[in-house]
Amino acid sequence: MRGSHDLGGLEGLGPISPEAESCEPVFHADWEKRIFALTLAVGFLGEWNLDESRHARERQSSDDYLRHSYYENWWVGLKTLLLEKGLVSGEEFDSGQLRFQASSLGLSALQAEDIAGILLKGSSVEMQTEKAPGFLVGDQVRVRQEIATGHTRIPSYVRGRIGIIERHHGAHVFADRNALGRREAEHLYNIRFSSREIWREKSREDANFDVRVDLWEPHLEQVGRPACK
């Protein structure tokens, strides 16, 4: 099976060379732990959603995004949201001195003793909608080719590729719009792609396996339905 290092990076930046999972630590430095914890803790204030958080990291310049490490990008995204939402001022960032307490902004801090229960609880992103699904299981669909200017959950390597709908998950929060603060429902599907369809001329002749990707209805356009037997 094709390894992850053969997938190739974004925009022709070359192959991906990940560390082996057996020897890669969860965190490479103590400051990464703090950024991870801080991002989760501040997120529980409810001033933004998960997709807005991801989009804030992506809104850097391409040079900065690629220059930064993984958790440096998390920090940039968190700082962006804190400033945009008015939770911290530029003066406070520069001086390191807090001018206002969270309580003065009508916010309550996450308590350490509550963290484990909150993280285990989670919440569903499934939604109700009166809109009927536009596709059926077994439909051939093509992933839309256009490059989104905002946040999107479409992997680059499946854009323009044809797959078959294996499962309809129902309606879920559409991440692309949720990143803009618009919580809207769209039908979500599991799509099966052939490795040869995805990588085409780069695919080895002896390699033919399936790749399954979950995509929302706005990501897809219909190719055709197979004839009944």
Image (spheres, rainbow, N blue to C red):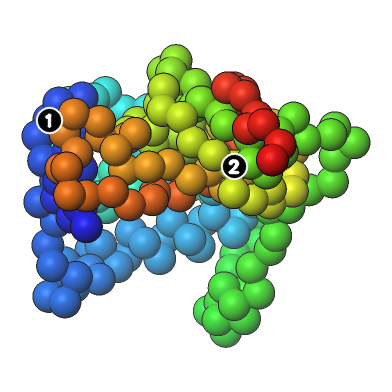
The answer to which image quadrant residue 155 occupies is top left
What residue sits 41% from the left and 22% below the top? 160
Disc 1 target residue: 13
Classify the position of the C terminus by image quarter.
Answer: top right
Q: Tell me if 142 is positioned left or right of 70 in this view.
A: right
What residue sits 59% from the left and 42% below the top? 165
Q: Amino acid at mark 2?
A: Ile
What residue sits 53% from the left and 43% below the top? 191
Q: Position of residue 2 (x, y in %)?
A: 20, 52
Mark 1 element type: loop
What residue sits 77% from the left and 35% below the top? 133
> Total number of numbered labels?
2
Q: Position of residue 145 (x, y in %)?
A: 43, 18
Q: Which mark is residue 176?
A: none
Q: Position of residue 175 (x, y in %)?
A: 58, 38
Mark 2 element type: strand
Mark 2 crowd level (few <14, some 14–19, many ≥20, 10 Å Cα): many
Q: Nearer the viewer, mark 1 or mark 2?
A: 2
Q: CA distance from mark 1 to mark 2?
A: 31 Å
Q: Position of residue 11 (x, y in %)?
A: 20, 24
Seen in the picture, residue 217 relative to 145 is either above or below; the reply is below
Residue 164 seen anywhere in this rendered image of the structure? yes
Classify the position of the N terminus by image quarter.
Answer: bottom left
Q: Amino acid at mark 1?
A: Leu
Disc 2 target residue: 165
